[in-house]
Amino acid sequence: MDPKPTTRTDTDTLIIGAGPAGLATAACLAQRGKRALVIDQAPEVASSWRHHYERVHLHTVKTHSALPGLPFPDSAPRYVSRQGVVDYLTRYADHHGIEPELGETVVAIEPAPHGAGWITRTASGRLIVSRQVVVATGANRRPRAPALPHRERFAGRVLHSREYRNAQPFAGQRVLVVGMGNTGAEIALDLVEHGVRAALSVRSPLNIVYRDVLGRPTQLSSILLSKLPPALGDAAATLLRNLSVGDLGRYGLHTARASPLRQLREEGKTPVIDVGTVARIKSGDIQVYPGIQTLLHGGVRFTDGTEHPFDTVLLATGYDAAVNELFPSTPLPLDARGMPTDVVGQGTLTGTYFVGFDVRQSGGLLRTIAAQAQQVADHIASASRD
């Protein structure tokens, strides 16, 4: 097979990713009189949101989830639906005149010779030479699927939560959801709300908070508490969690030692923002089991020795950013979760920017993206004047 012909594109700023982070950065640059080239491997903007499971809504209020330069419409509910977010992001790109070049998969980002910017190579054989490159490929680039002992014995299906859209294909089945982050908790809830028998496998202690407490969004309380000295904020967050959610040990759920704020700040682990799963667990509609010891032909043996039948094992075990793979010749400063630690690249990474990877801030990722997009746009505008 003949190699694909190489074409070259020169641009001042390249943005990789046409999701919220890429669109917000492009919009902020446009507001400062600078147009960027935006590319994405998907065939449409907001691809990740288009493929989320149907039930999902933002857990953050719309007033603190909008991107710079365009609020959510007044008609949108407090917690916007998946389709509402897709519609908003599509309108956002149109509003700011952003026209991404789609179907471009990046395979490598490398320093240009003599320190003259960066060369981005795509699978189509294209070389994009830019002074700056903004990586906005998202924290959820690749599904993470742990190895399950004796998976080959299991007669049912093993799926990642990325493949879940709605409960319809699971009618009449017994489904084990592995992992109780926000995705696992909400998928289990969606299943039982549609008459599917669902259970959760939960290995580790966790933090659970209600989305609203006495009518007040927990997001707003989290933002407020994060402004206090850490010890005081952590104590208040722990008290609020204990008073509202309480001890769920009798149901198989054990509470993390760290406060929700501390766990977010230090580990980048968002608490489970409950929208009804806890009530279903308390009522017995959703069973909670410990970690998986092994798969069996017709079910699962758990670490407590019990065995239960299941037709499907659904892995809600998260994602990896895998951003380091895009820089084959330049080491990245990454945290324990593989996320870039800097928004603005330093040293050998001068001219690179990483938007949408900081999952440690209170108030939700969209709020963080809005702030980072403006920070990056200011830095690029300032650098171009030097």
Image (cartoon, grey):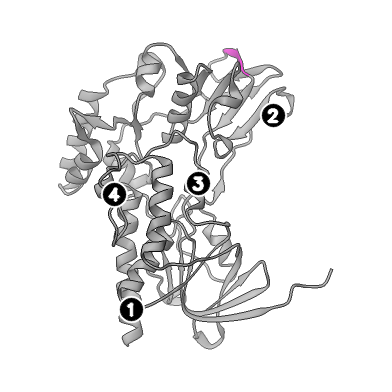
Disc 2/disc 3 C-alpha distance (Å): 30 Å
* Location of mark 1 (residue): 33
Position above or below: 298 against 139: above
Residue that badge 2 annotates:
151
Q: Nearer the viewer, mark 2 or mark 4?
A: 4
Q: Give residue 1's quadrant in the image.
A: bottom right
In the image, is 280 to the left or to the right of 148?
A: left
Label 2 residue SS = helix
Q: Looking at numbered disc 3 in the image, what kind of residue is underneath it?
A: Arg
In the rendered image, which residue does mark 3 sit on?
A: 50
Q: Residue at x 23, y 36 (%)?
A: 217
Mark 4 or 1, nearer chain start: 1
How much space separates mark 2 and mark 4, taking CA atoms? Answer: 47 Å
Residue nearest the observer in this picture, 240 or 106: 106
- Comparing 28 with 149, the one in front is 28
Type of amino acid at the residue the image marks with label 4: Pro
Q: Residue 289 location, x and y as percent?
A: 49, 19
Q: Residues within 10 Å of mark 1 (few under 14, many from 20)?
A: few
**231 in relation to 12, above or below:** above
Q: CA distance from mark 1 to mark 2?
A: 55 Å
